[in-house]
Amino acid sequence: MNFNKIVKISNKKIYKDRCFVVAEISANHSGKLSILKKLIKKLKSIGVDAIKIQAYEADTITINSDKKDFKIPKNNAWSKYDNLYNLYKTAETPFKWYEKIFKFCKKEKIIIFASVFDFKSFELLEKLKCPAYKIASPEITDIPLIKKVARTNKAIIISNGLANFKDLNLAVTTVKKEQNKNLIILKCTSAYPTPLQELNLKTIKDINKKFKCLVGFSDHTLGHDISVHAASCGAVVLEKHVYLESSKTVDSFFSLSIKDFALMIKKIRNNEIANGKIDYDITKTSKKNLNGRRSLYVVQKIKKNEYFSNNNIKSIRPSYGMHPKHLESFLNKKSKYNLQPGTRLKKKFLKNEKKSGL
């Protein structure tokens, strides 16, 4: 079974020549539905292709425990939250919001889908007719969840940030067994923010080669330069966290502001225009400068019966004379006429008599 080269999410197509830009809201709503709605409206106005939320609550993703296993290491970016439960409680998007969020996005005419973390969130999202699902990299080993999502036959997006090749291959094989052709893999590094030397964006094309599916990029670097570059490296989906500058959140330290997100989209679209198509013709605008090409001209006075030479005829700009390829056909031949410098060389000027002894 081959994966589709064009994957649809709602009314939009994802394919190799255009990057589908996903705004990841994650915890950047600051626990307020009003901020989430404000984000959605602003993101709609700057031209994002889709909004994504993370479908979990603290109680569905971990337990409230202070045992060592559940403590956040001191060298972790979120260590101030002490344990996993506190972190996820602060970051969660409450399930009671979901119906309102999906209705709001429908009203705003913008696509919304979600990262799904367990059966409970999946069932809730199915009731809301979620058009696509993301499997976050920590869940890539949750094969029962991947099976359940794949059986919907909707677009399934899988990140590989915490997966080795064996893990990724098992996830892809699982999707294949369920006959879901709508797979997109996101090259991802689960480090916040991600060091440049750990990105390895060459893997984007290698994933495409090995798994024969569409490939995108989940970006956790600072700024937007790498996102723009990844799109030029073949990423057909770009996922990036976004936040309102007025709010400090759990994830804002590695997220883009709305202003920078808009600039990122503009640069990606400009790059797509610049990439264009394979074309060897002289473009419409370039044709205005065709006179900048070389052609054959008389450059010194030539008397009748004088021989043409490299001194009195040359290939120079502009391009109104004969093609330079004809230069040798004039050399060592006599001129029929007196010719002035700046005269376009023409075949009728030849007397057709070779210079003797040469």
Image (cartoon, helix red, strand yellow):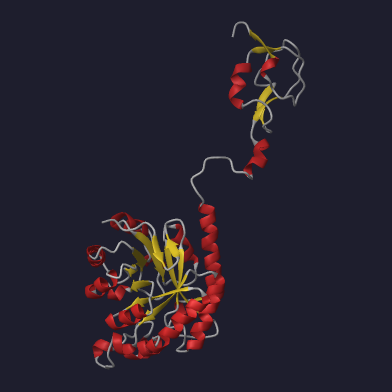
Q: Is residue 250 visible?
A: no
Q: Quadrant of residue 70?
A: bottom left
Q: Is residue 63 above or below residue 258?
A: below
Q: Is residue 224 above or below residue 70?
A: above
Query: In which quadrant of the rendered image does the N terminus lie?
Result: bottom left
Q: Is residue 219 above or below residue 335?
A: below
Relative to 322, 264 lies left or right: left
Residue shown at 68% from the left, 27% from the top: 321
Query: In which quadrant of the rendered image does the C terminus lie?
Result: top right
Residue shown at 72% from the left, 10% from the top: 305
Instruction: Name the foreground residue: 184 vs 356.
Output: 184
Relative to 286, 3 lies left or right: left
Residue shown at 45% from the left, 72% from the top: 240
Q: Is residue 307 above or below residue 279?
A: above
Instruction: Name the foreground residue: 318 vs 5.
Output: 5
Residue 339 drawn at (x, y percent): 76, 19
Q: Quadrant of residue 263?
A: bottom right
